[in-house]
Image (cartoon, helix red, strand yellow):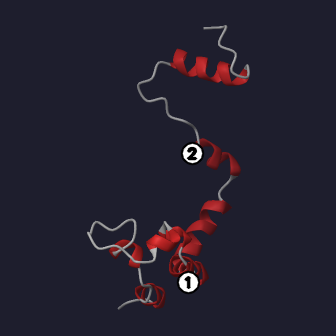
């Protein structure tokens, strides 16, 4: 069964994918001559407003509520940068350059 939110999204005319700048078809929207890019077109703006005005799904809200409810320290651990196979010396140099406002004299 299609949810109410999915049903609302199917009513959007996504002309930008069919005949707009993101289209892979040869035929183009005649309004592109006037608006240059889909982002400048009122049809695109109306569709964006329609998406933003839709009700957010309950499970999506719960998921984000759980994320924001986590302990701050737990979230900080999740946000650490992974160096992967990079040598740590290179990472320290980048950090030092940023700390010294771009001064490369230490290299």
Residue drawn at x 40%, y 77% as measured from the top left: 30
Which label lies toward us, 1 or 2?
Answer: 1
Q: Are marks 1 and 2 in contact (CB under 8 Å)?
A: no
The crowd level at tag 2 (other Cα within 10 Å; few <14, some 14-19, many 20+) is few
Q: Which residue is mark 2?
A: 78
Q: x, y percentage for residue 28? A: 34, 73
The image shows residue 38 at horizontal and vertical percentages of 48, 70
In the rendered image, the vertical position of residue 15 relative to residue 8, given as above or below: above
The number of callouts visible is 2
Measured as percent of width and height from the top left, residue 3 is found at 43, 89
Label 2's element? helix
User: Which residue extends farthest left?
Assistant: 26
41 relative to 86, above or below: below
Q: Is residue 103 left or right of residue 5?
A: right
**Which residue is the extreme one toward the top?**
106
Q: Residues within 10 Å of mark 1 (few under 14, many from 20)?
A: some
Residue at image location 70% in from the left, 15% down from the top: 103
- Tell me: 27 left or right of 105: left
Q: Residue 8 location in percent, x, y? A: 47, 89
Quadrant the N terminus occupies: bottom left
Numbered disc 1: secondary structure: helix
Distance CA(mark 1)–CA(mark 2): 34 Å
The label shown at residue 90 is none
Of 101 and 55, nearer the camera is 101
Lateral position of residue 27 relative to residue 51, left or right: left
Residue underneath mark 1: 50
81 or 11, nearer to the observer = 11
Image quarter of the C terminus: top right
- Which of marks 2 and 1 precedes in the sequence? 1
For residue 23, side relative to residue 86 (left or right): left
Q: Which is more toward the observer, 35 or 63?
A: 35
């Amino acid at each position: 069964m299609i949810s109410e939110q999915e049903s609302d999204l199917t009513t959007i005319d996504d002309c930008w994918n069919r005949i707009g700048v993101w289209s892979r078809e040869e035929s183009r929207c005649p309004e592109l001559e006037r608006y240059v890019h889909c982002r400048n077109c009122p049809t695109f703006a109306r569709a964006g407003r329609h998406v933003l005005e839709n009700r957010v799904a309950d499970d999506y809200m719960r998921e984000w509520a759980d994320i924001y409810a986590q302990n701050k320290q737990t979230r900080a651990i999740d946000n650490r940068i992974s160096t992967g196979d990079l040598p740590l010396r290179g990472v320290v140099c980048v950090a030092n350059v940023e700390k010294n406002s771009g001064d490369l004299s230490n290299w």
